[in-house]
Amino acid sequence: MTRFALLALLVSVAAPASPADCYGSARAIVLTPLETALLEAARIGASSGPAHAAELSIAAREIAVAIAAAEPTALERQALRLALVHACAFDPAVSVLSISGPPRHIARLLARELRQSEFSHVGVGVARNGRFAHGVLVGARREAEVSPFPRDLAIGGAATLRGTLRTLREPWIAVTDPAGGTLKVPTSAPADFSAPLSFDRPGRYVVEVVGAGPRGPEVAAYLVVAAGGVPLDPPSRPAPEREPADPLQAEARVTDAVNTLRALHGLRPLEPSAQLSELARRFSQEMLEQRMVAHVLPGSPAVGERLERAGIAYQRVRENLASGETTLAAQQSLEDSPAHLANLLDGPLTQLGVGTARASEAGPVYLTEILLSPAPPPLPGLPEDAEARVREALRREATRRGRRALIADPQLDEIAAHEARKMMRTGELRPIDLRGVELTRGRGETTQLFNWSVPGQRLVVADVFATRSPEEATRSPHLADTRLRYVGVGVASGGGQFWIAVLYAD
């Protein structure tokens, strides 16, 4: 008996019904008596047994046939992924359990292996070879409901991706096109998603839906789409190299692979960082100990706070996590994921830390990649207080631009401080609505604040930032407007970053 896992971290999908609909459509399959016995065995001992998914059983049959034919790649990651695509299964991560033996025994053996099953959906398949039966169970923990969506389209075809996340929230969609470029498509609803997608060039596309949860961002669905009748198979790759005995060499191969990928897209290489790599190794070890691939582990915070605790300041950070039979296999799973690929191809990033952990040669390797651009050094002689740093940075930038000095306004300060605290509490960066807010204007008179100039009222504008460096407030676009003479600054810090509101008035 051998247990395999196809893992991808960090999506749901659909279009108007048509004959080409595949993902999310009801599939039909008639199970054999032995497959029915396997399905019942998979439900034994569960408080609420996993649901049967016909598409997962179709995939399980394809895998079982390959095992019965003694195909050496039957349980390799690419073969498993292709079986899911052929069956129109949109699950981004599945576990595959294969059992071979006399037909009367395999259901009992399967039940013994699945005493602790966390699957929400399962599929089963059996293929015979002489006196032996080869049974396969494919299990998934589904985080999305997907409306019908086509797998095959004509060039220039379009479809709308629709669905609902189950326990995750804040969905967004990532797409990899045939040239290897990535596209992020935001959605606005807390759990539902709907986005029109077009497939304008021939080739193979990969579509993911990503959602946020207590363990960080997760991929909720994974769809492969072919435009123009191209094969659904992924591009052929050279045979994998033998895993080095030295984990540092394996990590160096990942760094080389990342920079080779970036070079193909005209991006500058990332500089290896020993400090980031050590942080990545520690997190990979935690994933190994907890047998979990997640951006937030029990007892360990998200990457931003981990960096803050290590004293590493940054402007921009991305984190990729994966698990695989080898380090390069884990890296390849990241490149096959549109959301993770977008992180690898994020142009402004400059540094990379790679860390791995594994218990034995036979066990899976856990991979962590931390990609960031460091925070700029503080301006010489700048005070440590964050609000004072913002004011000083604005003063220096105004002087550099040759404009007159800005005058601090206590009332604008009060409004800015209130807005900064509100952004920190909600964790959202939003424009400040100044309508209805009153401001004293000389001799006890008051006037309402607006974002445009009206006779008798003050011209007031606002800029907001969420950043690791208070000096980033100098990017304020209104700093160049010489009509604005007064300024208010509000700063709140939390979650390893600064929430800044800057108000200007004439």
Image: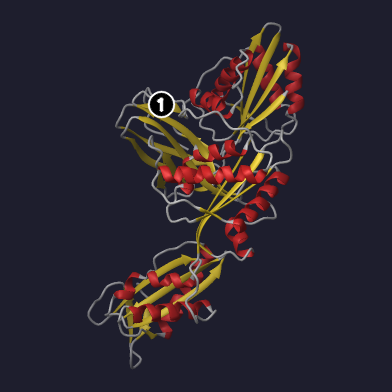
> Which residue is painted at 37% across and 77% down in the image?
397
> Which residue is painted at 47% across and 27% down in the image?
236
Q: Is residue 412 above or below residue 424?
A: below
Query: Which residue ends up furthest to the left in the rendered image?
Result: 455
Q: Nearer the viewer, residue 38 or 176?
A: 176
Q: Position of residue 326 (x, y in %)?
A: 63, 36
Query: Which residue ends up furthest to the bottom in the rendered image?
Result: 443
Q: Nearer the viewer, residue 14 or 249?
A: 249
> Which residue is painted at 74% across and 27% down in the image?
113
Residue 11 is at least partly visible in this image: no
Instruction: Say what amino acid the circle numbered 1 marks.
Output: Asp
> Which residue is painted at 55% across and 28% down in the image?
239
Q: Position of residue 106 (x, y in %)?
A: 73, 17
Image position of 203 (left or right of 364):
left
Image position of 416 (left or right of 117):
left
Residue at the spot of label 1: 21
Residue 420 is at least partly visible in this image: yes
Tell me the element at label 1: strand
Q: Position of residue 344 (x, y in %)?
A: 48, 47
Q: Quadrant of the N terminus?
A: top right
Q: Nearer the viewer, residue 109 or 380?
A: 380
Q: Position of residue 475 (x, y in %)?
A: 38, 69
Q: Is residue 55 above or below residue 338?
A: above
Q: How is the image coloured?
A: secondary structure
